[in-house]
Amino acid sequence: MAASSSEAVDGTGAARPGAPGADRVVVDSALYVDGRRQAGPLSVAQAAAAARGEDGFVWLGLRHPTAEDVVDVAAAFGLPDLAVEDAVKAHQRPKLEVYDDVVFVVLKPVRYVDHDEVVEVGEIAMFLGPRFVVTVRHGHGEVLGRVRAEMDRGEGPAAGFGPAGVLYRAADLVVDGYEQALEEINTDVDDIEARVFGPGQGNHAERIYKLKQEAAELRRAVLPLGRPLQRLVEAEVPHVPEAAAPYFRDVQDHLLRAADAVEAVERQLGDVLQANTARVTVGQSEVALRQNGDMRKISAWAAIALVPTAIAGVYGMNFDHMPELHWVYGYPAVLVVIGTTCVVLHRVLRRNGWL
């Protein structure tokens, strides 16, 4: 029971490093009869033998396996090669596929890291047979640990539906995670919206773009899950009893709500980005206008200063034969011309708004 406790408490699911072959990546394995744990942890061979028995079902959980690690598992449980390849490589879209008597499901649990404003996406691949569940987990996540803990205590509706109960409860927790992540993203979106429309200046485009990327990452996890849940609701999937359909319908309702919320967040972020861009543009225009006004004032004063400079420059040349050089009224006349010209220029420039 030690492995089960590790998975249930912290969700890390530490594998048994000393175990041979596929057992090395087994988080936990046990036989469940009437929704209650009977034995475990079991080796891959023991789990496969128990799955061929008369009562209950076996749940074998793997974490970060390689292709070599799952060879024995695939052979023991008759898992389809294409689905095994998808489960090992990960990076799949949420989906549901039926291979003869085996159902293959991919779920994408998410977690929003608030201090980094990043959506971390994990992956859970599930193989459902008539009397077994094989789960493969990549990345973070406490989903399977929580389901396992509930099963071990015999709690919740998952205990009564066999392999379909494990799928239902895992999907339920994954979708709950979407809603929780959206609540936290909405908090950050409201914060940045208040900053954009609040007092003060600043360009928040980088943060907005980052949130848009995280919302898009969340959308890629949420939207593709709609079709698999619809098939489960319509009882089109083997090993899923009709009695489980209402439970999957409840998960589907939550997923639809999450999908609407994702679209609303993306629209809100788009509007905030446009508002931020407009505000930055207006701010830049105001700065440019102030700079233009300053340049006009400088140019106006330079034009006024040019008059005495030019006249003084002419009469500062050392030539003997210059007009009015020896005129007794030459100096006061030059001062009057300079003063009059500067006053006229000042009035004209001020009337035109340059001063």
Image: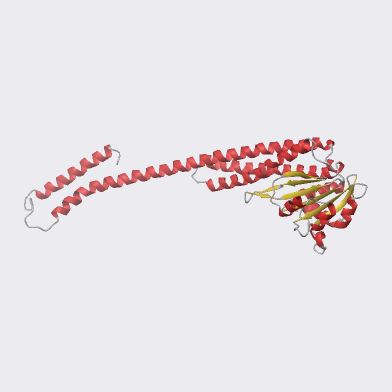
Residue at 73% from the left image edge and 35% from the top image edge = 253
Residue at 18% from the left image edge and 45% from the top image edge = 339
In percent of width and height, residue 275 lies at 51, 39
The extreme bottom residue here reads 18
Q: Give left or right: position of 272 versus 284.
A: right
Q: Give left or right: position of 156 versus 283.
A: right
Q: Give left or right: position of 235 versus 261.
A: right
Which of the 4 image quarters holds residue 47? bottom right
In percent of width and height, residue 214 lies at 62, 46
The extreme right residue here reads 54
Closer-to-camera residue (188/222)? 222
Residue at 8% from the left image edge and 53% from the top image edge = 322
Residue at 60% from the left image edge and 46% from the top image edge = 213
Please, is residue 139 above or below residue 97 in the view? below
Q: Quadrant of the N terminus?
A: bottom right
In percent of width and height, residue 44 lies at 85, 57
Q: Quadrant of the C terminus?
A: top left
Q: Looking at the image, can residue 205 be seen?
A: yes
Q: Looking at the image, can residue 198 be seen?
A: no
Q: How is the image coloured?
A: secondary structure
Q: Give left or right: position of 295 versus 38.
A: left
Which of the 4 image quarters holds residue 227? top right
Which of the 4 image quarters holds residue 27? bottom right
